[in-house]
Amino acid sequence: MKEKILKVIDEKIRPYLNSHNGNIEIVEIKDEIVKIRLLGQCSNCISTRYTIEDVIESSLKSEIPEIKKVEIIDYISEDTLNLAKKILSKGL
């Protein structure tokens, strides 16, 4: 199943995300649930819920009907963490 998922991601999902300076990573596939992490600009986007439901989940389910759900794993980029540390250290 992983190969099928990667094919759909590479052909349909990743080009869309790349056009928004983002990317996707598969974290886990278990019990027909695909856990993903959004990367780049997509990781902090206010439209994340739309992207997951209307782009990622719908694309995967239409090509691989046995997929039940797509879940996002929360992720904070290293750049965001470093920025937060800088801001917080100035306040001390």
Image (cartoon, rainbow, N blue to C red):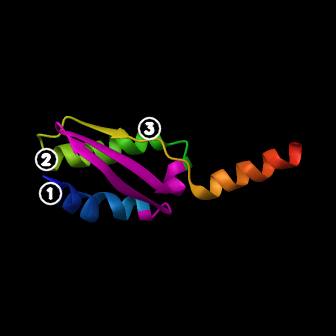
Report the residue marked by disc 1: 4
Verify whether residue 56 appears in magenta. Answer: no
Q: Is residue 55 left or right of residue 1?
A: right
Instruction: Magenta stretch: give its range.
Output: 18-43
- Within 10 Å of disc 3 (Cα), the crowding (few <14, some 14-19, many 20+) is few
Report, in whole angstroms, how far the alpha carbon at label 3 lies from the one at label 1: 23 Å
Q: Is residue 25 left or right of residue 79?
A: left
Report, in whole angstroms, how far the alpha carbon at label 3 lies from the one at label 2: 21 Å
Name the residue nearer the viewer: 59 or 66. 66
- The secondary structure type at the circle numbered 1 is helix
Residue 35 location, quadrant: top left
Amino acid bearing label 2: Ile
Report the residue marked by disc 3: 49
Along the polypeptide, which appears first: circle 3 or circle 2?
3
Marks 1 and 2 close (CB-CB < 8 Å): yes
Name the residue nearer the viewer: 3 or 82. 82
Q: Which mark is residue 64?
A: 2
Verify whether residue 20 appears in magenta. Answer: yes
Report, in whole angstroms, how far the alpha carbon at label 1 lies from the one at label 2: 8 Å
Along the polypeptide, which appears first: circle 1 or circle 2?
1
Amino acid bearing label 3: Arg
